Image (cartoon, grey):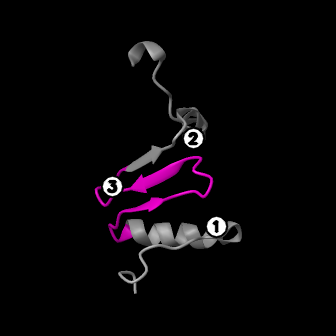
Amino acid sequence: MLQDTPGHLFLEHEVEDLASFLQVSMLNGWGGYILTEANYVNVFFSHDEYIDFFAQTSSNLPDLAKVFGIRQPSADAR
């Protein structure tokens, strides 16, 4: 049961299983975390329909922004 084991470790060859798990989670309005073993970039997805990306080193986030086509604010805007 989910309350007994509230997490799962997906191995590298289980990417499709991870995608299915995320789809079921989001379609049912659940929230959760995706935590990477290397702590490169981690994710929180909310039942309120938003996603937060976070990392110990902020230099990892621009790579993610490129993948999603997000324009980073300039240093002057911060």
Could you tell me the amino acid type at mark 2? Leu
- Relative vertical location of residue 36 with respect to residue 15 in this rendering, above or below: above
- What residue is at 39 percent from the left and 81 percent from the top? 2
Mark identifier at residue 4: none
Q: Crowdedness of circle 2 by 10 Å Cα count: few (<14), some, many (20+)? A: few
- What residue is at 52 percent from the left and 34 percent from the top? 58
Relative depth, front residue between 70 and 14: 14
Please report whichever mark, 3 or 1, sits nearer to the chain's N-terminal start.
1
- What residue is at 66 percent from the left and 70 percent from the top? 11
Q: Quick one: which residue is furthest to the bottom in this view?
A: 1
- Callout 1 secondary element: helix
Please report whichever mark, 2 or 3, sits nearer to the chain's N-terminal start.
3
CA separation, marks 2 and 3? 19 Å
Front of the two marks 2 and 3: 2
Write down the residue under mark 2.
Answer: 64
Q: Crowdedness of circle 3 by 10 Å Cα count: few (<14), some, many (20+)? A: few
Magenta-span inclusion, residue 36 = yes
Mark identifier at residue 15: 1
- Relative vertical location of residue 39 with respect to residue 61 in this rendering, above or below: below
CA separation, marks 3 and 1? 22 Å
Instruction: Report x, y in % for residue 14.
Output: 65, 71
Q: Quick one: which residue is furthest to the left in this view?
A: 48
Could you tell me the amino acid type at mark 3? Glu
- What residue is at 45 percent from the left and 23 percent from the top? 73
**In this rendering, would 48 be left or right of 71?**
left
Mark identifier at residue 49: 3
